[in-house]
Image: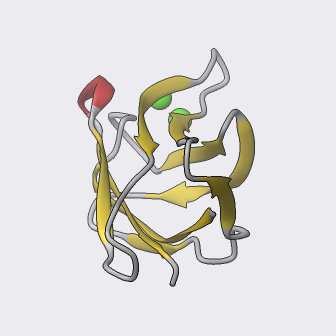
Amino acid sequence: MTKQLHLYSLSCRKTEDATGMDDIILRVNGITRWSGRITDGQTVDISSIDTIVYGDDQDVRIELYESDVEGDDFLGFNSVSNYPVGIPFFLQYSLDEADYTIKAALLT
Ligand SMILES: [Ca+2]
Ligand SMILES: [Ca+2]
């Protein structure tokens, strides 16, 4: 059996950078799958990211970074394994005083 994880949207409650927009990098199992600019109060569509297929005994590591010229800021990670199929759930990222949420679901 395999599971299919789909990511729908990224919401920013609070940016990591003190001024201007954040440049977010989203990595799935260490590979960059999406990047884009976002600021306080915005939600962006990330559903163009390919559905992630993984085994029952595996989990998926989803990391967020904020890009700066002097290096990337790590905003946190979530490991997704089991959730009820078909019901959206939310992943929180709150390191470095940032506040982000990813909406995701396991597909039927
Ligand atoms: Ca930063
Ligand atoms: Ca930045």
Q: Splitting the image into 4 quarters, where does residue 67 fall?
A: top right
> 3 or 12: nearer the eye?
3
In percent of width and height, residue 64 lies at 51, 39
In percent of width and height, residue 8 lies at 49, 75
In percent of width and height, residue 105 lies at 43, 72
Would you say 48 lies left or right of 67 here?
Answer: right
In percent of width and height, residue 13 lies at 24, 56
24 w.r.t. 40: above or below: above
Q: Residue at x 32, y 34 (%)?
A: 18
Q: Residue at x 67, y 23 (%)?
A: 69
Q: Residue at x 29, y 37 (%)?
A: 98
Q: Residue at x 29, y 61 (%)?
A: 90
Q: Splitting the image into 4 quarters, where does residue 84 fall?
A: bottom left
> 37 or 104: nearer the eye?
104
87 w.r.t. 17: above or below: below
> 28 or 56: nearer the eye?
56
Q: What colour scheme governs how the chains and residues are painted in the rendered image of this protein?
A: secondary structure
107 w.r.t. 25: above or below: below
- Which image quarter is the N terminus in? bottom right
